[in-house]
Image (cartoon, rainbow, N blue to C red):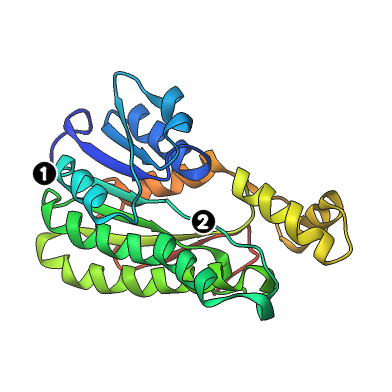
Amino acid sequence: MASPSQRRGVVTGAASGIGKATALRLAREGARVLAVDVNGGGLAELEGEAIETLAADVTDSKHRQTIADWADGAHYLVNSAGVVMVKPIFEITVEDWRRVQTINAEATFFLCQAIGPRLAAGGAIVNLSSSSAKFATTVEVAAYAASKTTILSITRSFAYALAARRVRVNAILPGIVDTPMQEEVLEKVAPMRGLTADEWREARNRAVPLGRGSSADECAGLIWFLLSDEAPYMTGQAINFTGGLVTW
C-alpha cells in the first residue's frame, strides 16, 4: 500500500452527515478524496486541495462509471449515500420500496462491483448500514431498514469476492447519529406517535445505555479505522456503533 499521503478514496453521500464527516476525515489523514453527492450545492464547502467534488446520482449507471473511472487504482470506497423514507408500514407502496432499495442497496452493490476490482491491492470498502437492520422497532422506516439489512449481505458477499486481492469490505451500523437524516426521522415520526420531536429524542436517548446519540465525526473515526492499516485482518464484518443500544 502507498503511504497515506499518496492514497485516494471515494466517499458517496458526502454533502452532509456521516459522508461529509468521512470525506473530511480522509482528507485530514492525508488521502486525496472524491466527494460524491447528488446535491452538488451541498458539496461546495468541501472543495479544496485534498478534496475533489462530483455532483452525481449513484443510481445512474453512467454516473457510477464516472466514479469508477476516477477510482481506478484508488485505495478506499465509502458507500454512505442513502435516503430514509418515513411512512406507516401498511402504507408503503411498491414505488416507495423500489426507490429506497435503488438508492440504498442497489447503488451500494453496483459501486462495490464497479470499484472493488479496481482498488489497489490492500484497499478497503466500508458500507453504511444501520442499527435498524437489526433493531426494527421504528416500523415507520421499514423500507429503509430492509435496505440496510440488504447492505449487510452485500458486504459479506464482496468480502469473499475481493479477499484474493486483499481488499477488505466491512459495514458499520450507526444508531442514533446527529445528522440531517436523523432530524428528518425525528420530525416525521414523533407526531405519528403523538409526541413532539424533543420528547421522542429524549425517549430514544434514554434507551441508549450510554445515554446519548453519536456525532457524525465519531462515525467517521470508526470508518477510518476500518479503512486504515490498523484493521488489516477485518473483513466481512458488521460493526455496531450504537452506544450499546444493539449488542448482537
Secondary structure of the residue carrying numbered label 2: loop
Cβ atoms under marks 2 and 1 closer than 8 Å: no
Task: Decide which of 68, 232 is in the foreground and name it.
Answer: 68
Give neighbour class at mark 2: few <14, some 14-19, many 20+ (Cα, 10 Å): some
In the rendered structure, which disc, 2 or 1, sits on the residue that comes first in sequence? 1
Residue at horizontal 34%, vertical 60%? 107
- Please report the residue visible at 18 percent of the width from the left and 43 percent of the height from the top: 71
Q: Nearer the viewer, mark 2 or mark 1?
A: 2
Determine the residue positioned at 55% across, 72% down.
143
Horizontal placement of 87 versus 240: left or right? right
The residue that label 2 is drawn on is 83
In terms of depth relative to the viewer, which is nearer, 40 or 184?
40
Which of 57/78 is in front?
57
Can the viewer see residue 139 in this picture? yes
Expressed as whole percent of the image width and height from the top left, the position of residue 224 reads 37, 44
Q: Residue furthest top?
A: 49
Residue 6 rendering spot, x and y as whole percentages? 16, 30
SS at badge 1: loop
**Is 227 situated above or below 132?**
above
On the rendered structure, is 211 left or right of 148? Answer: right
Instruction: Please report the residue visible at 30 percent of the width from the left and 54 percent of the height from the top.
Output: 60
Q: Is residue 234 left or right of residue 122?
A: right
Badge 1 crowding class, 10 Å Cα cut-off, few under 14, some 14 to 19, many 20 or more, is some
Picture disc at residue 73: 1
User: Eyeballing the image, is 76 above or below 54?
Assistant: below
Q: Position of residue 116 (x, y in %)?
A: 18, 57
x then y, percent, for residue 88: 70, 73
Image quarter for residue 56?
top left
**Looking at the rendering, in which quadrant would you find the N terminus?**
top left
Amino acid on which the number 2 mark rests in the picture: Val
The alpha-carbon separation of the residues under discs 2 and 1 comes to: 29 Å
Question: Callout 1, which amino acid?
Answer: Gly
